[in-house]
Image (cartoon, grey):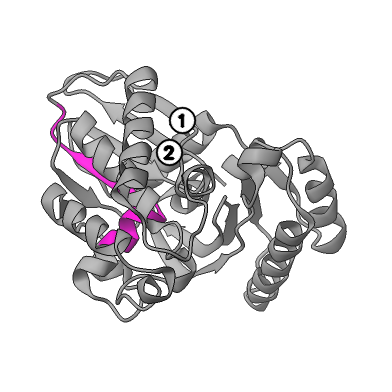
Amino acid sequence: MKKAVIEIGTNSTRMLIAEMKDDEINVIKKDLITTRMGEGVDSTQNLNEKSMKRGLEALKEFKSEIDEYNIKTIKLVGTSALRDVKNSQEFIDQVRSQIGYNLEIISGEKEAELIFKGVTQDLDFNDYIIIDIGGGSTEFIWKKRDEEEVNIKSIDIGAVRLTERFIDDKNNSLGRNIVDDISTYVNETLNEEIDILPGINNLIGVGGTITTMASIMLKLDEYNPESIHNYILKYSDVNKVMHILRKLTLKRREKVKGLNPDRADIIVPGIIILLETMKNLRNLKLRVSDYDILHGLIVES
């Protein structure tokens, strides 16, 4: 049976149409629209009218695609930006009245659980750390060798949130002082919030920042899941790319091959989260996964 799932994130709203066959996910269609729902959320704790309008327009577009497949099973969730705001019910009501979908806002822990279900559909390791860098939050899921327990943690650091907090003019290149300020903040937050013992060998990365890094390294003209899935990112390469990008103005950054122009203004803070995480976890290599929360929603729905 075909299913459709949608995640409304801080930076983008994404849709996956798929079906389960012999416990494997058969992807039929995947789409993304940059809606920037988290615009201003870090300072105001409210969704603004423009972001809600962008979100509704994206959902209308996705609904028309879903209706073409005559799909009845539809799951719609909201993550970091929507759970951080005071006026989420207003948006939930608009979605129900204008689109006809029920929107569920999930906790950071539930988000991490769904990421785990998605990524582990194509993961065959005894020990691992999964990191998902989003627009408003970053999720960590880890399992130690010979232990059954899977640990889950969600932290309020994300590419959009840090961009709004630390960067006053997104059009300019970023000075070393801004990079240092973001790095220090991320490192301090990780030390306060995450207690992962070293010795876990496999670092798995999902989310737009990480898949974009792979796309940049591969110099892709357009997103290619097959090329990106299982690509290995090295700390030295990620660090080099970050410094190249931060020295560019926004207009020049938007022209970098492999980088979606809609993500160009938030990519550097996102990469800094990745770099500080790799250092903190003492793991200088990361395997990129194209499987994520959308696949987890397919499994669960």
Residue 1 point in image, percent of width and height: 55, 61
User: SS at mark 1?
Assistant: strand
Is the residue 100 above or below the residue 102 in the image? below
Q: In this orientation, does residue 68 appear?
A: yes
* Residues tagged 1 and 2 counted as in contact (Cβ below 8 A): yes
Depth order, front residue of 95/122: 95
Residue 34 point in image, percent of width and height: 56, 65
Specify whether 108 is left or right of 228: right
For the point 74% across and 63% down, the residue is: 56
Residue 225 point in image, percent of width and height: 32, 68
Which segment is the magenta one? 200-213
Is the residue 231 above or below the residue 142 in the image? below
Q: Which residue type carries mark 2?
A: Thr
Is the residue 224 above or below the residue 79 in the image? below
Q: Which residue type carries mark 1?
A: Ser
Q: Which residue is mark 2?
A: 138
Q: Which mark is residue 154?
A: 1
